[in-house]
Image: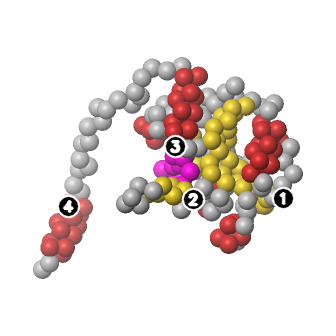
Amino acid sequence: MSSRDRVLGRIGRALAQGAPDPVVPRDYLRVHGDRTPAATADLLAAHLTEYRARVHRTDEDGIAALLGRLLAARGARSVLVPAGLPPRWLAAADQVRVQDRAESTPYELDAVDSVVTGCALAVAETGTIVLDGGPGQGRRRITLVPDHHVCVVRVPDQVVDSVPQAIALLDPTRPLTWISGPSATSDIELDRVEGVHGPRTLEVVLLGAQ
């Protein structure tokens, strides 16, 4: 009998006997500091910027004009629009609208210049955006294939301080995507390359945080 067989056998016997779940101590801090909602939004913006995301702030009256400017500055000719995205957000954009379709191929998605989505949550202490495929977010792949992702975060409603707070609010059965800045990697020489397994450019709009 191999070592693998012995290990798997022990696991099987433990499961069959109804071994109790181990007690995991959770005495860590849930939040590192006491902040106002404005300070939490500022911390999120600072960490996103540190990760080389581009951060913008606006309110409901300015969201359409801002998104129109961001897409025009990018030179986008097409923008992918997931179902549930508020139509008024793109009222000032003149790009060709591409719908989030299940049958879209990676090649078709790669031909799209930009994608605009909402999010599920944002974590200030880590500068992380979380997508869960809900309304206004679309399928996971639409934010991984196009080279330019504009993500709108409602402040303060969608911003939490810490990862433990986010975990408590998120549904683990949904397809969660955690994004901290644009896609990037480094080789052994520490040369940073962006856009390897996701968008090369991430722009985050903090909506309601003027």
Query: Which numbered tag is attached to residue 45?
Result: none
Q: Quadrant of the N terminus?
A: bottom left
Residue identified by numbered label 3:
51
Residue identified by numbered label 4:
14
Q: Which of pointers 3 and 2 lies earlier in the amino acid sequence?
A: 3
Q: Which of pointers 4 and 3 lies earlier in the amino acid sequence?
A: 4
Displayed quadrant of residue 15? bottom left
Label 3 and label 2: CA atoms lie apart by 13 Å
Label 1 and label 4: CA atoms lie apart by 57 Å
For marks 1 and 4, give the one nearer the viewer.
1
Q: Main secondary structure of the magenta part?
A: loop
Q: Between 197 and 119, which is closer to the camera in this rendering?
A: 197
Secondary element at tag 1:
strand
Q: Which of pointers 4 and 2 lies earlier in the amino acid sequence?
A: 4
Q: Residues within 10 Å of mark 1 (few under 14, many from 20)?
A: some
Query: Which numbered tag is attached to residue 195?
Result: 2
Q: Are marks 2 and 1 in contact (CB under 8 Å)?
A: no
For marks 2 and 1, give the one nearer the viewer.
2
Residue identified by numbered label 1:
96
Q: Residue at x 56, y 38 (%)?
A: 49
* Amino acid on which the number 2 mark rests in the picture: Gly
Secondary element at tag 4:
helix
* Amino acid on which the number 4 mark rests in the picture: Ala
Q: Residue at x 37, y 60 (%)?
A: 188
Q: Are marks 3 and 1 in contact (CB under 8 Å)?
A: no
For marks 4 and 2, give the one nearer the viewer.
2
Secondary element at tag 2:
loop
Q: Which of pointers 1 and 4 lies earlier in the amino acid sequence?
A: 4
* Residue 135 visible in image: no
Left or right, 77 with reference to 105: right
- Residue range in magenta is 171-183
* Amino acid on which the number 1 mark rests in the picture: Val
